[in-house]
Image: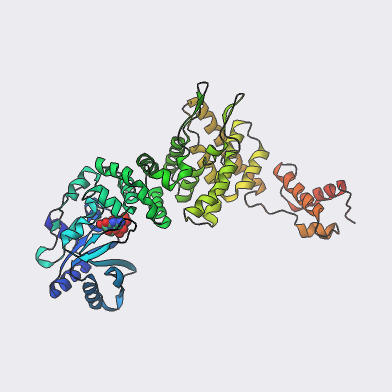
Amino acid sequence: MRHLSQQELADLLNRPVFHLISEVADSLGMECYVVGGYVRDLFLERPSKDIDVVVVGSGIELARAVASRIGKRAHLSVFKNFGTAQVKINRDNEEVELEFVGARRESYSHDSRKPIVEDGTLEDDQNRRDFTINAMAVCLNRERFGELVDPFDGVWDLEDRIIATPLDPDMTFSDDPLRMMRCIRFATQLNFEIEEETFNALNRNRDRIKIISQERITDELQKIMSSDSPGRGIELLFSCGLLELIFPELYALHGTESVGGRSHKDNLWHTLEVLGNVVKAGAPLWLRWAALLHDIGKPRTKRWEASAGWTFHNHNSVGAKMVPQIFRRMKLPTDERMKYVEKLVALHMRPIVIADEEVTDSAVRRLLFEAGDDIDDLMTLCEADITTKNNDRKQRFLDNFRLVRLKLVDLEERDRIRNFQPPVSGEEIMESFHLPPSKPVGIIKEAIKDAILDGIIPNEHDAAFAFAVTKAAELGISID
Ligand code: CTP
């Protein structure tokens, strides 16, 4: 991170939009600053789209004046109740979003995120912000253009890579408990440490998260999941006590138990390792979710069996059934993205079972049939799932997975199982064997599918039809 002089900041703000705001504010005699995330990201050299402008006076008045100077390309929305206004500018297909707000002082009541708001000074406004790195302001008025106002040494915290609140963290978090999620999200996204007192306050105030809507919590969680190291974010949520409240099923994976000196692994740390592995493999968001939830059924299926030790029989299907419940509660999308996660959780043991035994054509064909187009993601998840420290065992699995992958390519070329369509349809069976819609039609269709997956017949119409004739004869049904 670079420290920036007033001249350097002025150079970075050398954009028509800032000069326009500067001019309009000067003509109205208003003091105004660019503030918050935009300033933070200037120092971090991160791209930042939205621009927050704080005005000592009426933010709405400045926004109106700025919008009218821009004319047709500007779209103004005023939120009277919040005392804010937004100006969207469309230029060369690029959209800039400006948010204007009057400097304010806020006080909160215990049971709501909605503050009582009064007009205030720039200092009041900076005091009410969440973190020191988000409380820096740069003046836009011409005389002071580029001057940094940084009362909490946010620049030094950026340099030291620290997330800390400007005021007493208990107050900052209790006022607006969403900031607890933001704290962990910023620490994760920026790879910063959380200052000790701020971290302790997360723990003390964690119950306050209950007044935050699920949508907002999930929004932050999604930002954590999309970051470069989502596992670190989950670990922070765990260690400050928030995970237990916002994601009890994941929290339940934590811990080990032992009987007669035999213990099972801690499934939360294992899960985070798997998550890290899929991220390394370049996984997009929903594959990350599949990794996060792949063992979610383990706590409910855990048994101690004297003969076998610790078992988690069927944890994949129990886990898959939990996916829609979790998605619904978390207000995650309940569409094909949920179905995808559900499917990967359900199937995540299959390649391992295949790779643990002899890799037969028939087992691989069945896997391909069930996974369809998601087969590659499933294989990535399964490879990530091998976290054993026993290198020989790990190598054996990875070698077998390579074999499974080779066979997948080979079999797909030959049999086109990935998007399997029965080569003989139900209608054709009914017509040819003079059958009404009935059980034998289903039996014949299923037998054809099994014969193809088992490699008894090729995935072709004529072979499948001949097989159907034999199968029908076994059922006492003739073709004439
Ligand atoms: N802010 C705050 N408390 C919140 C939300 C926001 O104090 N619960 C303040 C911070 O000063 C923040 C600014 O409002 O920088 C703008 O908030 P927002 O646009 O949500 O976040 P950014 O900091 O811009 O970061 P990002 O765009 O990554 O969310």
Furthest-front residue in this view: 110
Spot occupied by residue 396 in the image (x, y as percentages of width and height): 54, 29
Q: Is any atom of residue 375 visible in this view?
A: no
Asked whether residue 133 appears in the rendered view, the answer is: yes
Taking depth in this image into account, of 157 and 441 the one nearest to the observer is: 157
Task: Answer above or below: position of 318 versus 10.
Answer: above
Residue displayed at 39% across by 43% down: 234
Q: Residue 240 is drawn in which quadrant?
A: top left
Residue 443: percent from the left, percent from the top?
78, 50
Judged from the image, the quadrant occupied by ligand 1 is bottom left
Choose between 70 and 203: the one closer to the eye: 203
Q: Position of residue 362 (x, y in %)?
A: 68, 39
- Indicate left or right for 257 with 8 as reference: right
Where, by quadrant of the figure, is residue 196 drawn?
top left
Q: Nearer the viewer, residue 127 or 114?
A: 114
Query: Going 31% across and 52% down the picture, which residue do you hit?
Result: 179
Q: Residue furthest top?
A: 260
Is residue 236 depicted above or below 148 in this figure? above
State whether residue 76 is above or below residue 342. below
Q: Is residue 424 toward the left or the right of residue 195 in the image?
A: right
Q: Percent x, y for residue 306?
A: 60, 24
Q: For the image shown, how many numbered marks are present on the structure?
A: 0
Specify whether 87 is left or right of 429: left
* Image quarter (top left, top right, bottom left or bottom right) of the C terminus: bottom right
